[in-house]
Image (cartoon, coloured by chain):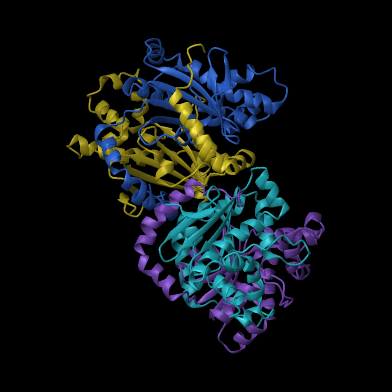
Chain colours: A cyan, B purple, C blue, D yellow
Amino acid sequence: MSYARKLPGYLVNRFRGWRATHYAENKSWFRHLAQEGQHPRSMLIACCDSRVHVTAIFGADQGEFFIHRNIANLVPPYTPDGDHHGTSAAVEYAVTALKVAHLLVVGHSNCGGVRGCHDMCAGKAPELASGSSFVGNWMEILRPGYEATAEFTDPEARIAAMEKQAVRISINNLMTFPFVKDAVENETLTLHGLWHDIGEGGLEAYDPETDSFASVL
Amino acid sequence: MSYARKLPGYLVNRFRGWRATHYAENKSWFRHLAQEGQHPRSMLIACCDSRVHVTAIFGADQGEFFIHRNIANLVPPYTPDGDHHGTSAAVEYAVTALKVAHLLVVGHSNCGGVRGCHDMCAGKAPELASGSSFVGNWMEILRPGYEATAEFTDPEARIAAMEKQAVRISINNLMTFPFVKDAVENETLTLHGLWHDIGEGGLEAYDPETDSFASVL
Amino acid sequence: MSYARKLPGYLVNRFRGWRATHYAENKSWFRHLAQEGQHPRSMLIACCDSRVHVTAIFGADQGEFFIHRNIANLVPPYTPDGDHHGTSAAVEYAVTALKVAHLLVVGHSNCGGVRGCHDMCAGKAPELASGSSFVGNWMEILRPGYEATAEFTDPEARIAAMEKQAVRISINNLMTFPFVKDAVENETLTLHGLWHDIGEGGLEAYDPETDSFASVL
Amino acid sequence: MSYARKLPGYLVNRFRGWRATHYAENKSWFRHLAQEGQHPRSMLIACCDSRVHVTAIFGADQGEFFIHRNIANLVPPYTPDGDHHGTSAAVEYAVTALKVAHLLVVGHSNCGGVRGCHDMCAGKAPELASGSSFVGNWMEILRPGYEATAEFTDPEARIAAMEKQAVRISINNLMTFPFVKDAVENETLTLHGLWHDIGEGGLEAYDPETDSFASVL
């Protein structure tokens, strides 16, 4: 591991500041969390995008949300083939071990992963479609979302629609996991679909009554 | 998607509060982020654990860190088989598209995933070792870390050592990705291993000179 | 008071959000409440339990309920000995100063205080029975409720029955206060006994005609 | 218990509405709370006043705060005499059984209990000073706060100062409880003093560095 490097100094400095302030002021809570374990109410599945801070937008502090983040907040279909499935493992742990009450899938505007999927499906990104790109292979999960948005002739509008398709597909795929389906049917787990507008600070939620997304405000 | 439910009201209330304060005060930055795209300096790979807030401990605001979170902050070995690999896709996107300068793997204390791996490898968690558990299959990535800590006779000490093994193994696996290895060798990317003590607010970093973890303070 | 600490930052953030939304939208009502004083219609006596939100379940906003919360929603017998009696003081203030029209005692399921009383009375919690535990001494108020439920052989069923005994005993004790008895007899005050099922969202009310609790739905 | 009455119909109606909406949308959380027990991060001690909604101002939902409410948010001194001490029992349960990380004492403006204490100490409320009033005996806990504010010649200013004295005295009294003192010294519990302005939607926190209250905004 000789190629590993020391932590950049500016992060050391900031950590020191956090420890002297936020940690010092909440030490009792951090000790409680360490000694008593975590009891998060919800799991969040969000994008890796640096512009999405799901704890901040929901006023959450340490201990509240169990958070999985991947490219484009996608959940693959249930595939019990023995391979390493990071997303499926996170969902399994949250639902069966932590017994979270809610599972929120949080999509967002300006998603680079969704744009890549659009371009790949439109034949404009051969490097993603080659089969040798992890991003391309991952974004195949969203291909049905490209096909479902054929009515959009404007690429930007189609990409925006695909961002919400990413949320829909993930929730539908979640229901293919037996332990998710069981928990939903037993009413010990609820699923929620959200889409966050970064620039405008907006939040839309999927409304099952209208089968569409609408602002929560 | 009729099984999806409305967003719990307390999250709507909190989001409204965030929008009226934090967003309103930083609107220009959020619009900049939306219009100019993200330019994060670093990628972080951290655990889903609700007690780990990597943005908070590093004083980071929206736009700074591209963040992937999975169970036990693991990176699987390079496996270009065409399947959906969420972690590998996130690393590929960060390194080849965003060209981040640093990639930090952040382990932590009291990790339930690492404990599960220990119990599975010790023959005490047959449900994880059955092959039908996504958590068990995922934690197989850390099995070499169990084997490398055979000198610990106390289970708690071994689990703690395995938490740091998770960081080492992830960094070693990162170097099996050609685009990571190239970027490191070209000195456009540095790798960093960290371990965060939740209860004590500590942070240890892997030091390549001593081949061990030491407090950054 | 040097041991006092700053308010945790997440609560500051959330308060700022409340002030910028809920307060801003209701400022006229809050100013009215401050200038004209409170005129609550009812007093509620409920448990401290974090899972019981009596304002939420009754759709109440600020100004409606004068609320006393203690362990297991108990009212001690009338004891005019000059000591500090917090519950009795709250009842006296509500009935004689605010002249509330209703006084509701709200018990609930899964009550840790009632469980502790059961275990203490059954000889299984010597730490509560020692005389040096404030919880134990407080729960002595409910000892008649243990004795009144001797027909239950299953401990869980007995504990559930004791939760309703806590409501009955409190209401009976309320009638030992001269100012409560007078108000009830003058028909300026009514007493009400309730039991809330947390998990099932249920509410049972004491029905004087049948001398038992029945669902209000 | 023949003097108990049925629940007023408007509360039945509101409860039905809550059950059909808020409960229905959060059923999984309520079941989780019932089955897994409560794990509140903090205890709040607030006034019974109908105008103070501590969950609302902190964006808190069911499960977050263990709440004791009495007249004027007072904590009496440690008095292990075997009597029924409701406040002391609540504190003991929160600190020793629930192991909360924070204990917040929340005072407020326009406090009728504090005004009564002022008038009683100023010789203008003989009915409270008679020894036969539970409110008067309870407010004796705050008498040192009257004496500590002798410099105020304006009664209204003195009453406002006494509202903050109520917070100070409660926190000082909390430290007379051995289990509170131990937890504070072991850094598993922090104490916090707050004062809420109802009409202006303000919040001041006691700052140990300046030994005074200052706005948190």
Q: Is residue A166 above or below residue C15?
A: below
- Residue extending farthest to the left is D153
Q: Is residue C49 visible?
A: no
Dividing the picture into quarters, in which one does residue A82 lie? Answer: bottom right
- Residue A75: % across, % down: 64, 62
Is residue C69 found left or right of C143 in the rendered image? Answer: left
Name the residue at 47% across, 74% down. Answer: B38
Dividing the picture into quarters, in which one does residue B48 lie? Answer: bottom right
Is residue D54 found left or right of B156 in the rendered image? Answer: left
- Residue A27: % across, % down: 50, 55
Q: Is residue A180 visible?
A: yes
Name the residue at 41% across, 67% down. Answer: B30
Q: Nearer the viewer, residue C22 or D62?
A: C22
Q: Is residue D168 above or below residue C104?
A: below
Name the residue at 38% across, 15% down. Answer: C179
Q: Nearer the viewer, residue C166 or A163?
A: A163
- Residue C29: % across, % down: 29, 38
Name the residue at 60% across, 36% down. Answer: C199
- Residue D113: % across, % down: 32, 30
Dividing the picture into quarters, in which one does residue A201 lie? Answer: bottom left
